[in-house]
Amino acid sequence: MRMKWILMIIFLTVILIDFPACNKLENLSESSSALVVVLISGNDLEGNPGSTTIFSDVMTSSGSIINDTATATLTAALLDPSQTTGTFYQDIIVDQIDVEYTRSDIPDAQQGVDVPFSFSQKVYARVLIGESLELPFILVQHIAKTESPLVDLVSGGTQEKVLKMEARCTFHGKDGAGYRIAPIVGTVSIWFANFADTD
């Protein structure tokens, strides 16, 4: 009988130790809330917003170099599935976005040579639990278009006329109580070229 109780205590201890590890997202967060990236969109080839494949003109016909922006559609959710409503303290405040570029044709792409340099930008946007928010942010800095490899699309320093990259966008934030959330990543494809335009 005593052995039965010992085995039961051991079993319950193992369950309690493993229980918090059931949700990997919870292990990465101090908050009871999670940020969800629903969509990242930007301009299509005609310059119209809302495209999930983004086209970046490295220089307009007038010689202007401008930032490329994207819009992230975000929502906030509760990690506890049994909780149906959230509070002000569980809303999420997005405070930073990191952008990093990769190329499928160059797995070990070097920043400033094969892809633009990664960068971070501070933002402030409150995402309410159960609601969505469209957050505009800079996807390509104008300075990147004056550096390799993008400037080579204009100067002729490369035989490539179009470059395709993926932008890995990482969103950071905290809940209304100040607890950090697990960073969430969204990826979008970008086609870079010196496109013909009427500007």
Image (cartoon, rainbow, N blue to C red):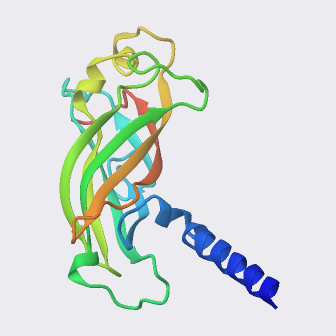
Up/down of 119 relative to 154, above or below: below
Residue 103 placement: quadrant = top right
In this rendered view, identify the residue nearer to me: 14 or 111. 14
Please count the marks in the image. 0
Q: What's the residue at 41%, 62% (across, down)?
A: 29
In this rendered view, identify the residue nearer to me: 190 or 43. 190
Q: What's the residue at 66%, 80% (across, down)?
A: 12
Q: Residue 188, image x and y in percent?
A: 46, 48
Q: Residue 147, image x and y in percent?
A: 31, 17
199 left or right, relative to 17: left
Up/down of 27 relative to 118, above or below: below
Q: Which corner quadrant holds the C terminus?
A: top left
In this rendered view, identify the residue nearer to me: 44 or 120. 120
Q: Which corner quadrant holds the N terminus?
A: bottom right
Q: What's the residue at 23%, 25% (across, down)?
A: 143
Up/down of 103 relative to 110, above or below: below
Q: Residue 24, image x and y in percent?
A: 55, 63
Up/down of 65 relative to 43, above or below: above
Which residue extends farthest front?
2
Q: Residue 170, image x and y in percent?
A: 39, 48
